[in-house]
Image (cartoon, coloured by chain):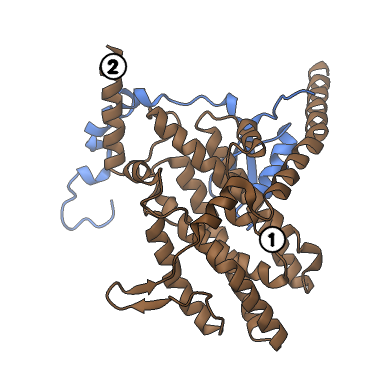
Chain colours: A blue, B brown
């Protein structure tokens, strides 16, 4: 008897038209088709979705939490990237 | 050198816990935090899965089609809850099948409540109203637990679980308002389920060996006794409303603490059941082991089929 496990899949669900797919969770399945079917049972029992994406978990590359500072800190000092950084003179309503 | 690094990491971890920032799978965490979570989440998952068994007993004997459809939906939810939680365990580096084998070997526990038999239809009502009610009391604070994947799984579970308690209360209410025989059946069921439901919150705070550390790590947000008291306070008025008597002659509202005083729990019974001597311990584990063993060829066949299809696709 082989004890090989079914691969792990990550499940992404589009909750309604116009929204993007969002990570819902993970599950085990022998192939992509079964992953979709299982995702339907596990993650959309209450009309939570209209579209499902699945991808094998080991195909995902994630950023390393140890790199978080070097990756994300630089943008903290660039407040001028936000519209609220700028003063709009009184009298101008829409800009 | 390594030691200095470790204490830096530990401090960073403690700071995040203190600031209520969730810990995520790839973040550094103390080994003991990881182990505690693997134990707690896998036992929680096992409880969801084993919890299907006492209910499955009544699927074919539900009194009408509506009750049957509801019960099936509830059992399917329990399976889903188990799966969310096994996925959360896997993010900690634990092997899903290993944790399941630990259940089958008796190394891992599950909620001892599921070792009590469901003898009548009223018991299915009690399982929803009291057992799921107690579970919700336990699970709502876990939506804020410090480990991200566990907290997110609990948010889903809690959303789904509230219908479970309501359908149970509906069953009990219907019986309590029915014929004298039906009312007696409901009373008999609460007599048997009340105390085991209180035991679901685990040993008293003085006896609980995991509580203190788990509170410090914000895995748990309330102690066992706090949760038990909240459950008693919430449930008594519900029983009063439908005219059932709680089997506890020491039950009395205490103005000073703004809650009910209640009688002593039979901890000998609790430990007996935890240690495998409840009415159904053996039956439950046998059912789970059989399911895994007899499903083995299906899992293998599915893999072989996936393999064959992948190869065929490659060749074309």
Residue A24 image offset from top left, x and y in percent: 55, 44
Vertical comparison of A72 with A94: above or below: above
Label 1 secondary element: loop
Of residue B221 and residue B227, the one placed in the foreground of this image is: B227
- Residue A33 located left or right of residue B44: right
Relative image position of residue B195 (x, y in whole percent): 53, 65
- Label at residue B3: 2
Q: Is residue B111 visible to us here?
A: no
Residue A5 figure quarter: top right
Measure the alpha-carbon separation of dots 2 and 1: 52 Å
Chain letter, disc 2 residue = B
Q: Which residue is outermost to the front?
A: B268
Residue highlighted by disc 1: B117
Of B315 and B37, nearer the camera is B37
Which residue is pictured at 77% across the width and 69% down the height? B62
Q: Do pointers 2 and 1 mark residues of a single chain? A: yes
Question: Going by the image, does A55 lie left or right of B247?
Answer: right
Viewport quadrant of the N terminus of chain A: top right
What secondary structure is marked by label 2? helix
Q: Chain of mark 1?
A: B
Seen at 43% across and 75% down, the residue is B250
Comes first in the chain, label 2 or label 1 = 2
The residue carrying pointer 2 sits among few (fewer than 14), some (14 to 19) or many (20 or more) residues within 10 Å by Cα, namely few
Quarter holding residue B263: bottom left
């Amino acid at each position: 008897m082989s004890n090989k496990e079914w691969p792990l899949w990550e499940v992404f669900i589009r909750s309604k038209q116009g929204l993007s797919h969002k990570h819902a969770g993970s599950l085990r399945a022998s192939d992509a088709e079964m992953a979709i079917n299982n995702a339907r049972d596990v993650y959309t029992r209450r009309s939570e979705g209209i579209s499902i994406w699945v991808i094998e978990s080991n195909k995902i590359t994630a950023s390393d939490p140890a790199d978080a500072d070097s990756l994300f800190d630089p943008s903290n000092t660039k407040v001028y990237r936000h519209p609220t950084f700028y003063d709009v003179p009184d009298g101008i309503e829409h800009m | 050198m390594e030691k200095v690094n470790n204490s830096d990491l530990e401090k960073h971890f403690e700071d995040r816990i203190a600031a209520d920032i969730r810990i995520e799978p790839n973040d550094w965490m103390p080994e003991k935090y990881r182990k505690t979570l693997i134990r707690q989440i896998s036992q929680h998952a096992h409880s969801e899965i084993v919890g299907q068994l006492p209910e499955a007993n009544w699927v074919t004997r539900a009194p009408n089609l509506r009750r049957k459809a509801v019960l099936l939906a509830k059992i399917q939810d329990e399976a889903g809850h188990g799966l969310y939680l096994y996925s959360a365990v896997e993010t900690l580096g634990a092997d899903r099948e290993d944790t399941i084998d630990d259940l089958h070997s008796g190394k891992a526990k599950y909620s001892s409540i599921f070792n009590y038999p469901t003898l009548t239809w009223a018991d299915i009502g009690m399982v929803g109203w009291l057992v799921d009610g107690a579970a919700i009391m336990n699970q709502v604070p876990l939506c804020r637990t410090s480990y991200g994947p566990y907290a997110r799984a609990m948010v889903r579970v809690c959303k789904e679980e509230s219908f479970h308690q309501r359908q149970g209360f509906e069953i009990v209410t219907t019986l309590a308002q029915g014929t004298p025989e039906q009312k007696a059946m409901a009373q008999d069921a609460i007599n048997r389920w009340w105390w085991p439901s209180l035991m679901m919150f685990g040993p008293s705070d003085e006896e609980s060996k995991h509580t203190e550390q788990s509170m410090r790590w914000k895995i748990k947000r309330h102690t066992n006794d706090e949760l038990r008291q909240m459950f008693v306070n919430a449930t008594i008025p519900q029983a009063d409303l439908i005219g059932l008597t709680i089997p506890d002659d020491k039950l009395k509202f205490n103005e000073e603490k703004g809650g009910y005083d209640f009688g002593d729990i039979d901890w000998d019974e609790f430990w007996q059941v935890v240690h495998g001597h409840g009415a159904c311990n053996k039956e439950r584990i046998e059912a789970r082991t059989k399911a895994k063993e007899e499903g083995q060829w299906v899992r293998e066949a599915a893999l072989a089929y996936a393999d064959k299809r992948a190869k065929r696709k490659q060749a074309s």
